[in-house]
Amino acid sequence: MRHSAMLTLPHPDTMRDLITEVAWGAAAAAHEGNGLLIALPHAVQISKYAAAYVHWSPGIVVTPGTEVTWHYVERKQKTSGTFIVHDVDDIEGDYPAGAEAPVAATRGRLIATGKTSQFTLVQALEKHVTRLLEASNRLVAREIEGRIGDEAETWAPTLNHGVADEVALESLSTELLWGTPEQPDSTVLRMVERAATTSINNQPLGSWFDRNLSARCEEAIRRYIDDPHIGRKIRRLQREHQPATVDELIELYRRVNPKESVGRERVFKALSADKTLNAVSHSLSLVVNVREGDESADVEVSDEEQAAE
């Protein structure tokens, strides 16, 4: 995991504890009644710094007296076993070494705790989401303007203004974390649920959240300025080859990316994507040339942009 991510992500132990409780709540919801259940750990500690996701069957939450089989994979080595759990301190069989003891609780308690822990973890990820949005904001601005590469930077952030203002960033952060009235199931809420209920390929939680949140934040910034997902590749080809018309650019794109489709609308959006405030306009010379030669092209170019050209 990147060192900078460690500064804003929750502590790994905190994330693991919260994810475990989210997993228990999700599994408990599948049981009936409100009797006592046995909740098993989400992961087994392999070493001081490494943990592995445990696959439990029939599940991570079971009723007392259930026979449980388990396995985990670490460095392509599979470890497995079977036991019967009568109570948290009465386990008959092969319980995984390095795993914490099971917890006994009612179904209602597990579900309630799981919901609270999901809220707590999303709240704890807010600082990291904010930082990633700010970095993505600067990255997209630099990429659109063709400046110093395509990787996010942390140096001199005040000198590298982005494509969106602070109000927009705050709105995007809220949407990613908590969703909208129309879609309350937010991106981060879904990520927390996925981390709790799948193995996520045995990746450390911190690295997994950092990488996936970074991608979602960049997508949110590009979506905000209506930049298509292939916009970066279109602009790079335009800068490197300087095709005279959109048709030439489309043909070039199809040769370079034969398995992808591209049309005029996405090309126009990619070339017109720009900052929303205090922007240095991306060159629209290609769009202007096409407009002059193609009356059917539905592209609006302001008087200021025409004058600049």
Image (cartoon, rainbow, N blue to C red):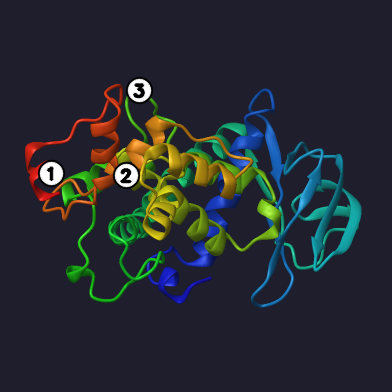
First-in-chain label (3 vs 2): 3
Residue 81 location in percent, x, y?
91, 55
Which of disc 3 and disc 1 is earlier in sequence? 3
Real-space Cα separation, disc 2 to disc 1, in angstroms:
13 Å
Vertical order, 174 against 264 (above or below): below
What residue is drawn where x is 30% and y is 66%?
A: 147
Question: In the image shown, does 126 or 226 lie closer to the viewer?
Answer: 226
Residue type, label 1: Glu
**Residue 52, quarter of the rendered image:** bottom right
Q: What number is the disc on residue 182?
A: 3
Q: Is residue 111 above or below residue 17?
A: above
- Mark 2 and mark 1 lie on one chain; the one further toward the N terminus is 2
Q: CA distance from mark 1 to mark 3?
A: 37 Å
The residue identified by callout 2 is 271
Q: As displayed, is residue 134 above or below residue 298?
A: below
Real-space Cα distance between discs 3 and 2? 31 Å
**Do the numbered discs 1 and 3 sit on residues whose CB atoms are within 8 Å?**
no
At horizontal 44% and vertical 71% (from top left) the residue drawn is 6
Q: Is residue 116 visible?
A: no
- Residue at (35, 23) in percent of width and height: 182
Q: Nearer the viewer, mark 1 or mark 3?
A: 1
* Image-quadrant location for residue 265: top left
Q: Quadrant of residue 288?
A: top left
Report whether 30 appears left or right of 286. right
Residue 38 screen position, x and y as percent: 72, 43
- Residue 281 is situated, as x and y percent measured from the top left of the image, at 18, 51
* Residue 117 horizontal/vertical position (percent): 48, 46
- Element type at marker 3? loop
Q: Amino acid at mark 3?
A: Glu
Q: Mark 1 highlights which residue?
A: 305
Q: Secondary structure at mark 2?
A: helix
